[in-house]
Image (cartoon, grey):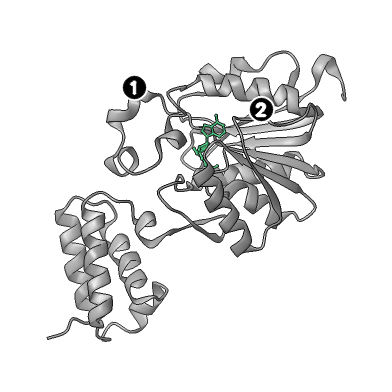
Amino acid sequence: MDATLQRALASAVERLLHGGVAEARLTAEVLLAHAIGRERVYLFAHPEETLTPEAARIFRRALGERLSGRPTQYITGSQEFYGRSFRVTPDVLIPRPETEHQVETVMRRQPRARRIADIGCGSGAIGISLALERPAYDLTLTDISPAALRVARENAATLGANARFLCCDLGAAFAPAAFDAVVSNPPYIPIEAREGLPREVRDHEPHVALFGAGQGNGIYRRLIADAERILRPGGLLSFEIGYQDLEAVHPMFGPDWRFIEANQDLAGWPRVLSAFFHPGGAGL
Ligand SMILES: C[S@@+](CC[C@H](N)C(=O)[O-])C[C@H]1O[C@@H](n2cnc3c(N)ncnc32)[C@H](O)[C@@H]1O
C-alpha cells in the first residue's frame, strides 16, 4: 500500500528520533514538503494524499542524508533570513537567526549611510537583506571564497538586489575612506573548539566560514584595523562575536572608536559589537 503524507511523516519522525536528530518533527515536515515540492502547510491540509513513487524516493534519500549528519538546509538548498529565502550550498555558511541583528544594527545606527561593505558575505544574507530593506544603500559584498561569492551573486539575482561583489581578504581591496559602514559576520570559532562542534557544523559547513584559517580571535583585530582604513570618519563598524567573546574583543577598539555598543541576541548573549570611527575625534 502506498504511504499517505501523514503516515510517511509519522514513520520519518520515528526514524529521526531514533537517529538522535534534533527537532525530529520539524525536520521531517521540512524534508517531506521539499520532497513533494510544496510548502509545509500543505502537509496538514492534505494528510491523506498519497506520495508519488518519485516523491517517496526523494524523501527516502533526504532522510538518509539527514540521518548521516547533513544539515537540513543543505538538503533542501535553502534557509530563511530576514523574511526571505536564501539559496545555500555547502560552499556557504547556513545563515543563523542571530545574524539578523546585523541588519537591524546597521539600519538603526547608520540610517543615512550610502556606501556599505559586507565583509565575508557567504550566501549574501546580511548585505542582500540591507540592499533590499534600504534601496538607498549602495552595497559591496566581499568574500575570500570565490565559490561563496557565486552563491551570493545568485541570491542577489534571484531576490532582485543590486550589489557589487568582490573576492578579497577582508578589506584589502578597498581605497581609504571608501565606506560609511562596514558590517561583518567573520569566521570566529577557534580551531581548538572544532571537536566540540555538532557534526552537522564540523563536518558539513565550510571551514573557512567557521575558523577563518585558524585565526580565531585574531580575525577581529584584523577586521578593526581594516575598518580604520576603509571607513570614512564617522563611519560605523558592526560585527558579530562569539557568545563568549565580548571581554576579549571589546578592548580591541582603540581610542578612535566611539559610542561602542554591545547588543544581545534573543538568547541573551552579547552578539553584536558596533562602534563609530572618529580618528582623533574627527567628525564629532
Ligand atoms: C561566518 S561566515 C558568514 C557568512 C555570512 N555573512 C552569514 O552571516 O551567513 C564567514 C564568511 O567569511 C568568509 N571569510 C573567511 N575569511 C575571510 C577573509 N580573510 N576575508 C574575507 N572573507 C573571509 C568565509 O568564506 C565566509 O563566507
Residue under label 1, please give it: 192
> As drawn, which residue projects farthest toward the left?
1
Q: Name the residue located 38 percent from the left edge and 42 percent from the top edge.
A: 205
Q: Give residue 16's mark.
A: none
Quick one: SS at disc 2?
loop
What percent of the width, then of the height, locates residue 135?
76, 56
**How many marks on residues?**
2
> Is 37 positioned to the left or the right of 120 in the image?
left
- Mark 1 residue crowding within 10 angstroms, few (<14) / some (14–19) / many (20+): few
From the viewer's perspective, tell me whether residue 275 is left or right of residue 205: right
Q: CA distance from mark 2 to mark 1?
A: 27 Å
**Residue at x 73% of width, y 13% of height:** 255
Under circle 1, the secondary element is: helix
- Classify mark 2 as within 8 Å of ligand 1 or not, answering yes or no: yes
Is the residue marked 1 within 8 Å of ligand 1, measured from its CB?
no
Q: Which of the 4 image quarters holds residue 197?
A: top left
Location of residue 46 by image quarter: bottom left
The residue at which mark 2 appears reads as 172
Pick whichever of labels 2 and 1 is earlier in the sequence.
2
What's the residue at 63%, 53% (across, down)? 129
Label 2, residues with CA under 10 Å away: few <14, some 14-19, many ≥20: few
Q: Position of residue 269 (x, y in %)?
A: 48, 33
Amino acid bearing label 2: Ala
Identified by mark 1, the residue type is Glu
Q: Residue at x 21, y 54 (%)?
A: 67
Q: Nearer the viewer, residue 207 or 41?
A: 207
* Of 249 and 117, the residue lying toward us: 117
For the residue pair 79 and 241, the one nearer the viewer reads as: 79
- Name the front one of labels 2 and 1: 2
